[in-house]
Structure formats: structure tokens, C-alpha cells
């Protein structure tokens, strides 16, 4: 009798231990909203690392993050940095941090040349936690840019992210399988299109710019099929592909720019139930040529925060994008020629009538 009771208590103890372990190892994902939270959550994660810090970053100018990496390195944490050496149109942007890493003997490598750019923004610590970011480690990130990050600890997600980091750090090829991780150039086109096509009621999108033809086509079809498609983008007119944006608005897409923030976030919210968040821009290069990472989340708390933030940004802080269609140069020339001919013909008729009257 006592033996049976003891066995039963042992089983209960094991079950409780498993539940406690699961709750500790698989904490709920945490959404980080920028610029509201500032640099503190990222710095704290680096400071709390016990054994290792692995960072993939595109733009890196903020020295407080470099100092945090240096402190971790000095405290015998295994630090590795995969850093884009020549960011697009900002070739010298990372120069100061690169020199700092060299001078402090912090291990770092350049990305694999097979990628056009390594635009991924991910922080891994202790092989147990990861932060998937839409932002760079730059000063502007925490001033006037709308950005997000998701802190995760799911073992299956962490395992694949860590394996890809190890492969990319060594410039080796790797296959990816996790259904909730989206990797460019491996599977991002297929997964992004699939998620957009799955929308039944709404798509809410933060996008710095949108120029990929297949993505634009999928968004236009969704709008024509009765899905409410709302996009907040940045205010930089030179990045607005007028013809493509005009096509979207004619299809019924609500396309606005933010007056309050520069939109650097890359987020798609589907039916307020699922979201994609990460480094992937809705451009051909980002989808097909760069190394990028985004994650699919369905966590209710995260979804509530994303929806509320989008809705608040939408209300009273946006202006419609002017998408007047620009005619091709040959069409403009043709119209001018027709007008010139019509004017000359009118003058000729007027002169002819005058001669008859005279």
C-alpha cells in the first residue's frame, strides 16, 4: 500500500517537474514595440546571457550594443557576430562598429557572398532564446521609426534559427523546415503568398515599401475578393513606386503613409489572428536574393498588441498616398502631338472661314 502511494507521488512529482520545466523553457513570446521600449530589452537580453551571444545584423551604428557585446565577450561568453559589411547605399555605415569589433577581438565574419545582402536582424542567446527584429542597431531605430521584435524560446524554433546561424557563419548551405519560420531566399515567396491568400476578412500591413509584382498582385486580388487591405508605409516619396501603388489603390487597397513615424517595420497581420514579423521587405531582392528571417505568430497576447498598435497608428496619424498615374514618355509625346495638330487644324479652319466671309 505504502509502495503504491509512493509510486503515485513520484508520478505526480515527475509531472509537476515537467510542467515547471516546460513553463520555464517555453515562455510565451514577448512583443517589443519600438520606439516605445527603446534599447533596454535588447541590452538586457545580452547582459543576461549565461554562455553565448550570436548576432546577425545589417545596420550597426549604435555603440551601446557594441559595448554590451564587448562586456559579454570579456565575461567569457561565447560571442559571434555576422555583420553585413557594405549595407546598400550606406557602404561605410558599419565602419566604426567593425573597427571596434576588431580592436576588441570580438569574433565576427562577413556574410556568404551567395546572398545579395544579409538583411536578417536576429539575436540568439544561450541556444535557448532568440529575438527576431524588424530593426537595425542604429540610433534612428529608437527615435522615430516604427519597428517591432518578437522574443521567443520555443525549442524547435530556436533549434532551426541556431542551425541556420551556424551554417551562415561558416558559409555552408542548409535546408530549413520549420512551418512558422520564413527564410529568404529559401521559402519566403511561397510562404508570404500563402499567408496573404489565406486572409478571409482583413490584412493589416506595415511596409517600408512594396514593389514585388507577385505580392502586389496577391494584395490586389485579396482586396477585389472583399478582404479589407490596409497598408501603412513610410513618407519617403522617392521610394514610392507610383504605378504599382496606383494599381493597388484602384483594386481597393487602403494605402496610407504615417505622419508620425518612419515605417521601417515589416509586419503582416492576417484576420487579426496571425502575424508575420521580421526583416523581410515586400521587394523582389528581399524575397529572392537576401538572407532574411521572419516568424509567424498566433499568440493571442502578441496579436492583441499588434492589432492595437496598428489601429492606433491608423487613426489620425496617416495621410493618403498620392498615386496619380504617370503616363509613359511616349504617351505624353503622342498626346502633345495630337494637341498640336488639333490646334493647327483649328487655326486653318478659322483662316479658311475668314477668307470665305471676306
Image (spheres, rainbow, N blue to C red):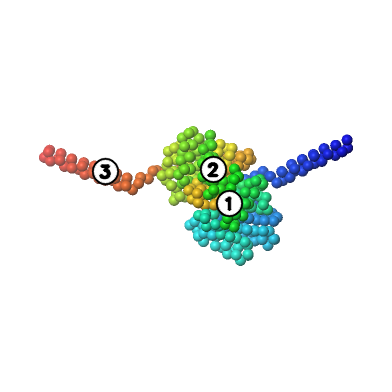
Residue 26 in picture, x, y percent from top left: 69, 45
Assign the N terminus to one quadrant of the image.
top right
Residue at 53% from the left image edge and 46% from the top image edge: 188
Residue at 54% from the left image edge and 43% from the top image edge: 191
The secondary element bearing badge 3 is classed as: helix
Callout 1 touching callout 3 (CB < 8 Å): no
Assign the C terminus to one quadrant of the image.
top left
Horizontal side of 176 relative to 127 (left or right) equals left
> What mark, if any, has residue 191 been given in the picture?
2
Residue 23 in picture, x, y percent from top left: 71, 43
Residue located beneath label 1 in the image: 174
Residue 121 in picture, x, y percent from top left: 58, 52
The secondary element bearing badge 2 is classed as: helix
**Residue toward you, 320 or 171:** 171
Horizontal side of 350 relative to 338 (left or right) equals left
Callout 2 touching callout 1 (CB < 8 Å): no
CA–CA distance between discs 1 and 3?
60 Å
Horizontal side of 103 relative to 222 (left or right) equals right
Amino acid at each position: 500500500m505504502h509502495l503504491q502511494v509512493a509510486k503515485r507521488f513520484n508520478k505526480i512529482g515527475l509531472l509537476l517537474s515537467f510542467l515547471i520545466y516546460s513553463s520555464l523553457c517555453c515562455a510565451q513570446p514577448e512583443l517589443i514595440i519600438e520606439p516605445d521600449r527603446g534599447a533596454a530589452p535588447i541590452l538586457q537580453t545580452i547582459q543576461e546571457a549565461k554562455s553565448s551571444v550570436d548576432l546577425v545584423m545589417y545596420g550597426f551604428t549604435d555603440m551601446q550594443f557594441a559595448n554590451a557585446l564587448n562586456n559579454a565577450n570579456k565575461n567569457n561568453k561565447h560571442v559571434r557576430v555576422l555583420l553585413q559589411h557594405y549595407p546598400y547605399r550606406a557602404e561605410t555605415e558599419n565602419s566604426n562598429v567593425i573597427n571596434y569589433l576588431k580592436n576588441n577581438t570580438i569574433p565576427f565574419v562577413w556574410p556568404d557572398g551567395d546572398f545579395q545582402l544579409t538583411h536578417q536582424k536576429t539575436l540568439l542567446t544561450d541556444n535557448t532564446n532568440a529575438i527576431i527584429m524588424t530593426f537595425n542597431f542604429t540610433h534612428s531605430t529608437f527615435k522615430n521609426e516604427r519597428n517591432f521584435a518578437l522574443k521567443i524560446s520555443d525549442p524547435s524554433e530556436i533549434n532551426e534559427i541556431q542551425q541556420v546561424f551556424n551554417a551562415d557563419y561558416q558559409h555552408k548551405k542548409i535546408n530549413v523546415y520549420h512551418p512558422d519560420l520564413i527564410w529568404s531566399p529559401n521559402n519566403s515567396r511561397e510562404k508570404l503568398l500563402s499567408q496573404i491568400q489565406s486572409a478571409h476578412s482583413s490584412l493589416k500591413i506595415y511596409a517600408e515599401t512594396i514593389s514585388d509584382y507577385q505580392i502586389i498582385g496577391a494584395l490586389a486580388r485579396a482586396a477585389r475578393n472583399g478582404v479589407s487591405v490596409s497598408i501603412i508605409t513610410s513618407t519617403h516619396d522617392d521610394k514610392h513606386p507610383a504605378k504599382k501603388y496606383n494599381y493597388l489603390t484602384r483594386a481597393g487597397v487602403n494605402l496610407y503613409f504615417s505622419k508620425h513615424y518612419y515605417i521601417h517595420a515589416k509586419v503582416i497581420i492576417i484576420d487579426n489572428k496571425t502575424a508575420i514579423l521580421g526583416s523581410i521587405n515586400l521587394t523582389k531582392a528581399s524575397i529572392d536574393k537576401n538572407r532574411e528571417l521572419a516568424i509567424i505568430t498566433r499568440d493571442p497576447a502578441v496579436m492583441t498588441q499588434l492589432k492595437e498598435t496598428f489601429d492606433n497608428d491608423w487613426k489620425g496619424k496617416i495621410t493618403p498616398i498620392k498615386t496619380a498615374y504617370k503616363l509613359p514618355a511616349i504617351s505624353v509625346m503622342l498626346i502633345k502631338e495630337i494637341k498640336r495638330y488639333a490646334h493647327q487644324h483649328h487655326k486653318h479652319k478659322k483662316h479658311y472661314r475668314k477668307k470665305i466671309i471676306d
